[in-house]
Amino acid sequence: MLAVSAFAAGLLFGLGLIVSRMADPAKVLGFLDITGRWDPSLALVMGGAVAVGAAAFAVARRRGKTLFGAPISWPAATRLDRPLMVGSAIFGIGWGLAGFCPGPALVAASSGQSKAWLFFLAMLAGMALHSLFTRRLAART
């Protein structure tokens, strides 16, 4: 049942990305271009997502477990630190250059967009470099 619910949630998320045009890099770049021909329509999509997410997290915090009874593991970190800020900046730069973030890139790649595949491969390379860097850093300490 857990796999079915995960599939349904992923399908709903992917459909939402397609309907909202978040998987279209031109639409996303239009939203990010605040000094040019700004398209504010994605702000409504993001605002709606934040509202739904905030409500869902509030319910999850009160319940303390998932709908299927599994315990919820909350992050231990609660403060803004340098790695979070640097990672956020890298994410934002990549989003602004490519018009993709991970979820929409997977949706676009599944429809055969070559730019999305390029982004996806670059994302995997970045993840591999991060893993290598953190392992080497841990080995030194």
Image (cartoon, rainbow, N blue to C red):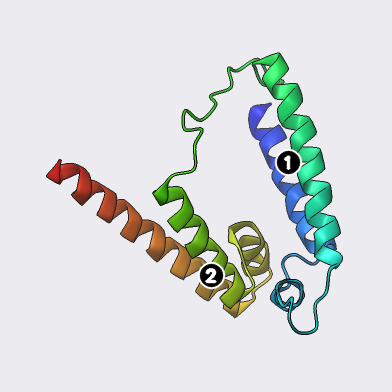
| Residue 113, image x, y percentages | 64, 76
Give the foreground label among 2 and 1. Answer: 2
Q: Is residue 97 above or below residue 67?
A: below
**Residue 4 in which image quadrant:** top right
Residue found at the far bottom of this picture: 36
The residue lying at 74 percent from left, 49 percent from top is: 13
Position of 20 with respect to 35 (left or right) is right
The residue lying at 43 percent from left, 62 percent from top is: 124
- The quadrant in which the N terminus is found is top right
| Numbered label attached to residue 33 | none
Category of crowding for the residue at label 1, using alpha-carbon neighbours closer than 10 angstroms: few (below 14), some (14–19), many (at least 20): few
- The quadrant in which the C terminus is found is top left
Position of 8 with respect to 20 (left or right) is left
| Residue 83, image x, y percentages | 40, 50
Question: At numbered mark 2, what does the secondary structure look like: helix, strand or loop?
Answer: helix
Q: Is residue 130 above or below residue 33?
A: above
The amino acid sitting under disc 1 is Ala
Query: Front-most of 59 and 109?
Result: 59
Question: At numbered mark 1, what does the secondary structure look like: helix, strand or loop?
Answer: helix
The residue lying at 46 percent from left, 49 percent from top is: 84
| Residue 22, image x, y percentages | 75, 64
Q: Which residue is mark 2?
A: 93
The residue lying at 61 percent from left, 61 percent from top is: 106
Position of 118 with respect to 128 (left or right) is right
Distance from the alpha carbon under mark 2 to that under mark 1: 28 Å
**Do the residues bearing badges 2 and 1 touch, measured as CB atoms within 8 Å?**
no
